[in-house]
Image (cartoon, grey):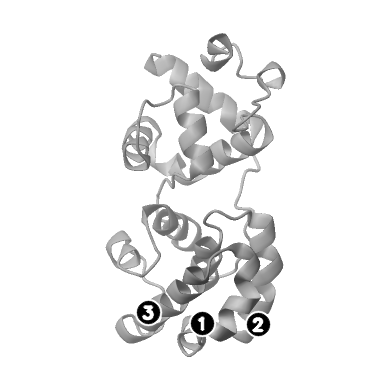
Amino acid sequence: MNRETKNRILEKLEEMYPDARPELIFSNPYETLVATMLSAQCTDKQVNKVTPAVFERWPDANAMAAAEVEELFPMVKSCGFKSKAGNIIAACRIIREKHSGQVPDTMEALTALPGVGRKTANVVLSNAFGVPAFAVDTHVFRVSNRMGLCKADTVEETERQMTRLIPREKWGKAHHWLIWHGRKLCKAQRPLCDECALKELCPYPSKK
C-alpha cells in the first residue's frame, strides 16, 4: 500500500470518529495510571465499574502506597489477576518514594514502575500530560496491520511504523480512531467489512 492510500485511510478514520476519546474514566494522572493498569486484558466498561470506589478509598498515589493487596484485590478482582493489585500498590510506593507522590511524566520513569509497559506509559503520557504518544493495544495492533497501514509482527514495531506515518500532533487522536474502529467495525473475529466506509481502500475485504 502506498503512502497516499494510507493517508486517505487515516483522513477517513478522522472523519468517521471525530469524537473518539478514552472510554476509561479518570480525572488526573494517578487515576489515569491506575485505570489503565486495570484495563489490561479487561474491558474499559468493567474498569469504570470498580474505579469510583477505589479512588474514593485511595484518592492519590500516597494513599494507595499505604494500601495492602488484601484490601485492594477484592475491589478489583473482576478486572483480573491479583498481580494487578500488587503492581498498582508497588508502583504507587515507588511514586511516593522517588517522585514525591506525583506520577512521573516520562517514558523512562513510567516504564520503570511495576506492571507498566510502553502501552500503559503511552496512554498516561498522552491522556494525563498531553505528551504526543501513540499507544498500541490489541485493537490498534490488529486494525493498523489488517488495514495495511503498517506491516509489523510486534507491538513495538507497530508503534515505530505508525509514528513514522502519522503526524506527531495526531498520535494521541489516531490511537483512539483505531480503537473505536476496532470496537465498532473492524472486530477481531467478524469484521463488518460490508458496513465499513473504508472497504474500497482497505485490502482486507479482498483477502476475505
At 37% from the left and 79% from the top, the residue drawn is: 95
Q: CA distance from mark 1 to mark 2?
A: 17 Å
In the rendered image, the residue lying farthest to the bottom is 66
Q: CA distance from mark 3 to mark 2?
A: 19 Å
The C terminus lies in which quarter of the figure?
top right
At 67% from the left and 70% from the top, the residue drawn is: 50
Q: Which residue is mark 1?
A: 69
Q: Is residue 117 left or right of residue 31?
A: left
Kindly check if marks 3 and 2 are in contact, taking CB atoms under 8 A apart as contact.
no
Q: Residue 56 bears which disc, if any?
A: 2
Query: Which amino acid is tagged 1?
Result: Val
Q: Quadrant of residue 152?
A: top left
Q: Residue 95 bears which disc, if any?
A: 3
Q: Is residue 86 left or right of residue 195?
A: left
Q: Is residue 56 above or below residue 196?
A: below
- Residue 119's spot in the image, x, y percent? 42, 52
Q: Earlier in the sequence, mark 1 or mark 2?
A: 2
Q: Earlier in the sequence, mark 3 or mark 2?
A: 2
Dot 1 alpha-carbon crowd within 10 angstroms: few under 14, some 14 to 19, many 20 or more: some
Q: CA distance from mark 3 to mark 1?
A: 17 Å
SS type, badge 2? helix
Dot 2 alpha-carbon crowd within 10 angstroms: few under 14, some 14 to 19, many 20 or more: few
Query: Which amino acid is tagged 3?
Result: Ile
Query: Which residue occupies the foreground of this view, 101 or 113?
Result: 113
In the rendered image, the residue lying farthest to the left is 108
SS type, badge 3? helix
Q: Is residue 94 above or below residue 179?
A: below
Query: Which residue occupies the foreground of this view, 81 or 141?
Result: 81
- Residue 176's spot in the image, x, y percent? 55, 43
Q: Quadrant of residue 108?
A: bottom left
Query: Which amino acid is tagged 2?
Result: Glu
